[in-house]
Image (cartoon, rainbow, N blue to C red):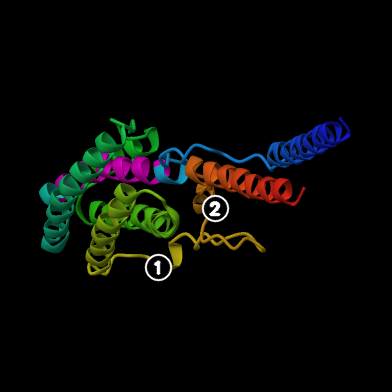
Amino acid sequence: MASLRSARHRSGHRVHRAAVLLTAIVAAVAVLPGVAVAAPAGQQLNAADMTLLNGVRLAGLWEMPAGQMAAEKGQSAKVREIGAAIATEHQELDQLVVDAANKLGASIPTDPTAEQKGWLSEMQNSSGARFDQIFVTRLRVAHGKIFPVIGAVRASTRDATVRKLCDDANRFVMHHMQMLESTGLVRWPELPPAVLPAPGNDGLLAAASANSGPQVGVSSTVVWLVFLAALGTGGLATYRLLRRT
């Protein structure tokens, strides 16, 4: 009887130790830091990306008719030639931005802004040398404004379609500025100053700051591997403990 009670005591002692150890394992798993088990969702368009899409689209909506107007009523042959080239190239760029917006499911403008319509009216109501000057001045300033935005978005966007559009837009805008400058009509002292980041801001432009950093999630596979490893370690420790008792 004494030996039977001793065996029962040892068996109960082993069960108690195993229960305590398993409880500790479960508790340890329960207090692991919370993690995201789902993979991050696809990158969404942000404010900087939309600024580029809208800006390139709006540029085409008024610069195409402006170029066509210059091709018809420019006083100098050079202005007429440049106007025709800008109108043609903006048709191509406009199609690229429309295709990009459709691919991304983004809504972009369909009409020029009130200010841009005012510029077109200004050119429509002018002629001769005055027309040439207004055409070159308005378009050179407009291209100078969108040019740094293209660079800022290109440097920080997470979207491949937007990145490709930046490359295309950069090529067209640079060419247009060079053509406009070749007329000799650009009034350099009257160009607006460069827009620089505020002191202490490491961003290239304020527009680029709209690109938020990627959010890193932890795969559910990793979570399960950690969980199974914890159980395996606990099981091995339990087995060794039972063998020693």
- Residue type pointed to by label 2: Ala
For residue 96, side relative to residue 245 (left or right): left
Numbered disc 2: secondary structure: helix
Q: Which residues are magenta?
A: 50-70
Mark 2, other Cα within 10 Å: few <14 / some 14–19 / many ≥20 = some
Residue 3: % across, % down: 84, 36
Query: Which residue position is annotated with label 2?
Result: 206
**x 12%, y 52%: residue:** 84
In the depicted structure, whether residue 70 falls above or below residue 170 = above
- Residues marked 2 and 1 touching at CB (< 8 Å): no
Question: Who is closer to the viewer here, 150 or 217?
Answer: 217
- Left or right placement of residue 90 versus residue 205 in this view: left
Question: What mark, if any, has residue 188 been given in the picture?
Answer: 1
Q: Residue at x 53, y 41 (%)?
A: 224
**Residue at x 35%, y 37% (from the top left corner):** 118
Q: Is residue 54 magenta?
A: yes
Q: Quadrant of residue 54?
A: top left
Across and down, in percent, residue 130 comes to 27, 53
